[in-house]
Image: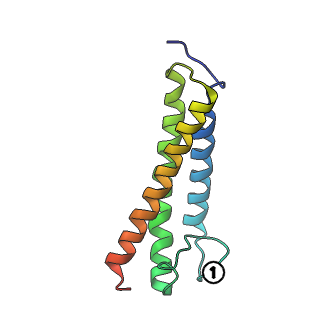
Amino acid sequence: MELVKYQNVIFIILTIVGIVFLAISIFLIKFPPKKINGLYGYRTSRSMQSQEAWDYSQRYSSKIMVVLGLVYFVLGVTSLFVPKQEDMVGALVSIVIVLSGVFFMFYKTERQLAKRFDF
């Protein structure tokens, strides 16, 4: 098994996405959107039902994004120890991992909103 640096598509995609997720989640934790808006924040029909749901969904989804960012980053670095694969396969694996995390975040946040607020 050869250590392949910077040529591993999974490493590149997951590490960059992990850093971006961490940056965005830290920004949202430090500067959460105060009022319901269509510009930034966790925006779904359920999160925009009330100010209380909005505030809760911003905090909850940001915490999940921190965890996802760390997971993506660690998986990206760990992929350096996996034999190099075809670029297309690596890209597809990365996309599946990232989308799975995003769907997980939406699922968990929406589920929490449904439990906490009677919409």
Position of the C terminus, as image quadrant, is: bottom left
Is 3 rendered above or below residue 14?
above
- The picture quadrant where one finds residue 40 is bottom right
SS at mark 1 in the image: loop
Is 101 rendered above or below residue 1?
below
What residue is drawn where x is 49% and y is 44%? 97
Q: Residues within 10 Å of mark 1 (few under 14, many from 20)?
A: few
Q: Position of residue 6 (x, y in %)?
A: 66, 26
Q: Is residue 77 left or right of residue 20?
A: left
- The picture quadrant where one finds residue 13 is top right
Residue 55 seen in render: yes
Q: Position of residue 102 (x, y in %)?
A: 50, 56
Residue 10 seen in render: no
What residue is drawn where x is 47% and y is 64%? 61
**Which color mode does the image show?**
rainbow
Is 56 rendered above or below residue 78?
below
What residue is drawn where x is 49% and y is 36%? 75
Amino acid type, mark 1: Asn
Q: How many marks?
A: 1
Q: Position of residue 108 (x, y in %)?
A: 39, 63
Front residue (pair 70, 49) = 49
Q: What residue is shown with label 1?
A: 37
What residue is drawn where x is 61% and y is 62%? 27
Q: Position of residue 110 (x, y in %)?
A: 42, 70
Q: Residue furthest left?
A: 115
Is 11 rendered above or below residue 2?
below
Q: Is residue 47 left or right of residue 34?
A: left
